[in-house]
Image: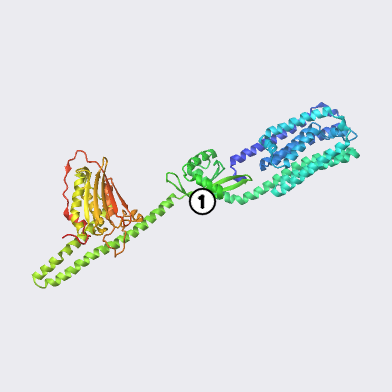
């Protein structure tokens, strides 16, 4: 496709072709001018002058036939065309040196030595046989050494042509049978080769092979005339034999130029049809596209690549090649992609660079450029922003859904104590109409329930407020130096009596009796109460809860282990998210709105720590708090007194709460 080539490449090819034309014209002009100043040619007899002109003109035609074959080879890259061009080169040298046709004009009979130089003729026949034969080592040697092959044909034709004419064997001069046999051999070779090239041209759809086959057929006809000339020797027959050589060369010259014209015409039609698609590729505003060879050497890149990576439309292909190869190094799936491409001829998928910065929708496929060669076309789009937007939207949808569920659960949780309040108030209103003693007895009976549900409502409201503070990033910690062992132990001991109501045993253990660290004791107390409250709620009777504190050089590990119902793997990934509950139904066994662990995680984050969970279904759970083992410098150690009201408040969703 001519238009797919860059303008610079086209200009270079045009300049190269122009140089060839100028060299040929100058060479022919020099030869013609040389003849003008050559005194010998002006006084020659008519026959000799005619023969000199015929030889000169025939040499030019054979040389142009060689040049035409080379031009066709450069376009089609067919080995057979280059090899047969060597035959026309040898023919041009032989004609120029007078080794073909011209001695016969001075003799009354056709003889091998006066008609053709046998050694150079055999070379040309060998070249024709190589042209139509399958691939072999001789063809490979010629194609791998083109310049050397051209030089060999020229030198061989000069040296052996000169030696053979010098020796001029008498036995060959007098053997007409050999002459006839040799020409029959030539007719056979030329016709067989002609038919083979005809068939090849038809199968491949390449007009140039039909042209070359026609040229060889004319040479076969020339050999037939040679046989005919043995019995009827005349100037006309000899001149016709020479003119057939003209025709053979002219067929190649005219045929190649006609084939070139057809090629240009087809290319023009093809380019008219492809221009829209080419512009679509080169000016594509959405997709990056490039073409590379089997070794990933970049051959073409569209404007989007040039503008995106180089901010320019005029970029050298070497710079593009270097840049894109560096990008390919960051594609961790490139090896698998190439393997699949070799298997299927195409690949489509989503890939990421090794750093995960880019998400790319990519298509890779092979295109055949020659029979035994293919290129790779890569088209890709950066969809990182689209993927990020979709993920954000999905997160918002999930967040919105969970928030609605949270509000729904919150309404349910608030409705329960409010209904109890309302019922008790109605009851007390009726009893208040009676005597004070009965009212006092009723109040004493229901005050525990009133107090419990007040705390439950207050706990719910505190959690909602804390969630809002965390979202607004205004939840702050009041750090000081405190004995973490004392805080954990005292909170655990205060919870023991609440756990005993469900016949649950709590044990505390530590490897250090004292460890001073930087923390907010009230927030740490709240996290531990939340973990213990969950452990009690999700454990059945006669189970154990273990609270362990392990002090290491740089970390403090606080573990709360229960023997409860456990947590599934799918839920473990979500329990520290806001509004997440294992059981969201309104008939669930335990109360809550699903924000306790989320608040706990935010509190631990404020302490630059971590909170982890290890659990299996029906095998209990272990929650682990990891805090930095470091204290504030130049500050004294403070004592923290456990707030019993906070404990009652945090454990208020355990219905068997102590009064």
Can residue 432 be seen from the camera position used here? yes
Q: Where is residue 343 in the image (x, y as percent from the top left)?
A: 56, 49
The residue singled out by tag 1 in the image is 348
Q: Where is residue 60 in the image (x, y as percent from the top left)?
A: 76, 35
Q: Is residue 535 above or below residue 482?
A: below
Q: Quadrant of residue 316?
A: top right
Q: Which residue is drawn at 68% across and 42% down?
A: 78
Q: How is the image coloured?
A: rainbow
Q: Is residue 48 left or right of residue 552?
A: right
Residue 15 vs residue 171, the one in the foreground: 171
Q: In this view, does 321 lie above or below 600?
A: above
Q: Where is residue 398 in the image (x, y as percent from the top left)?
A: 36, 57
Q: Where is residue 109 in the image (x, y as percent from the top left)?
A: 90, 35
Dot 1, crowdedness within 10 Å: few (<14), some or many (≥20)?
A: some
Give the farthest residue toward the front: 542
Point out the image quarter for the C terminus.
bottom left
Q: In this view, does 609 lie to the left or right of 486?
A: right
Label count reads 1
Can residue 61 be seen from the camera position used here? no
Q: In this view, does 260 lie to the left or right of 617?
A: right
Question: Does dot 1 land on a helix, a strand or a loop?
Answer: strand
Q: Quadrant of residue 105?
A: top right
Residue 300 vs residue 515, the one in the foreground: 515
Q: In this view, does 609 lie to the left or right of 438?
A: right
């Amino acid at each position: 496709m001519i238009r797919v080539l860059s303008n610079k490449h086209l200009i270079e090819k045009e300049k190269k072709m122009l140089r060839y034309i100028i060299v040929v014209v100058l060479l022919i002009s020099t030869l013609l001018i040389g003849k003008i100043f050559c005194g010998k040619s002006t006084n020659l007899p008519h026959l000799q002058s005619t023969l000199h002109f015929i030889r000169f003109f025939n040499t030019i035609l054979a040389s142009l036939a060689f040049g035409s074959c080379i031009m066709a080879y450069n376009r089609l890259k067919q080995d057979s065309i280059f090899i047969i061009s060597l035959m026309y080169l040898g023919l041009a040298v032989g004609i120029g040196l007078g080794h073909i046709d011209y001695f016969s004009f001075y003799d009354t009979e056709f003889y091998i030595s006066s008609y053709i130089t046998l050694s150079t003729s055999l070379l040309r026949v060998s070249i024709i046989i190589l042209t139509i034969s399958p691939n072999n080592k001789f063809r490979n040697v010629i194609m791998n050494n083109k310049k050397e092959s051209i030089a060999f044909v020229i030198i061989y034709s000069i040296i052996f042509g000169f030696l053979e004419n010098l020796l001029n064997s008498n036995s060959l001069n007098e053997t007409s049978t050999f002459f006839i046999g040799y020409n029959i051999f030539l007719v056979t070779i030329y016709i067989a080769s002609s038919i083979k090239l005809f068939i090849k041209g038809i199968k491949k759809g390449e007009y140039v092979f039909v042209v070359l086959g026609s040229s060889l057929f004319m040479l076969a006809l020339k050999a037939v005339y040679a046989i005919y000339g043995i019995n009827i020797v005349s100037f006309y027959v000899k001149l016709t034999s020479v003119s057939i050589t003209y025709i053979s060369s002219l067929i190649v010259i005219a045929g190649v130029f006609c084939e070139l014209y057809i090629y240009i015409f087809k290319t023009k039609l093809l380019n008219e049809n492809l221009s829209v698609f080419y512009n679509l590729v080169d000016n594509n505003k959405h997709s990056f596209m490039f073409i590379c060879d089997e070794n990933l050497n970049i051959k073409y890149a569209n404007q989007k690549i040039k503008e995106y990576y180089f901010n320019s439309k005029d970029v050298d292909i070497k710079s593009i090649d270097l840049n894109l190869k560096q990008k390919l190094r960051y594609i961790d799936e490139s090896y698998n992609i190439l393997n699949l491409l070799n298997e299927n001829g195409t690949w489509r998928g989503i890939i990421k660079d090794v750093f995960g910065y880019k998400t790319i929708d990519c298509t890779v496929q092979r295109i055949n450029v020659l029979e035994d060669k293919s290129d790779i076309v890569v088209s890709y789009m950066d969809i990182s922003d689209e993927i990020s937007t979709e993920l954000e939207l999905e997160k918002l949808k999930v967040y919105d859904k969970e928030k609605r569920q949270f509000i729904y659960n919150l309404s349910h949780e608030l409705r329960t104590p409010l209904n109890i309040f309302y019922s008790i108030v109605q009851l007390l209103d009726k009893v208040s109409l009676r005597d004070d003693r009965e009212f006092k007895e009723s109040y004493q009976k229901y005050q525990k329930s009133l107090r419990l549900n007040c705390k439950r409502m207050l706990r719910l409201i505190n959690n909602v407020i804390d969630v809002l503070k965390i979202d607004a990033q205004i939840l702050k910690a009041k750090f000081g130096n405190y004995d973490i062992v004392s805080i954990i132990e005292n909170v655990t001991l205060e919870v023991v009596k609440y756990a005993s109501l469900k016949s649950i045993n709590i044990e505390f253990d530590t490897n250090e009796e004292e460890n001073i660290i930087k923390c907010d004791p009230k927030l740490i107390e709240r996290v531990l109460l939340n973990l213990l409250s969950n452990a009690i709620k999700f454990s059945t009777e006669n189970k154990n809860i273990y609270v362990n504190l392990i002090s290491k050089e740089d970390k403090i590990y606080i573990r709360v282990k229960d023997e409860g119902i456990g947590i599934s793997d799918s839920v473990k990934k979500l329990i520290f998210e806001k509004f997440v509950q294992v059981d969201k139904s309104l008939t669930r066994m335990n109360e809550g709105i699903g924000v306790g662990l989320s608040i706990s995680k935010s509190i631990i984050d404020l302490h630059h720590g971590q909170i982890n969970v290890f659990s299996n279904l029906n095998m209990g759970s272990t929650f682990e708090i990891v805090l930095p083992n470091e204290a504030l410098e130049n500050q004294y150690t403070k004592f923290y007194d456990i707030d019993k009201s906070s404990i009652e408040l945090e454990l208020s969703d355990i219905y068997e709460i102590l009064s």
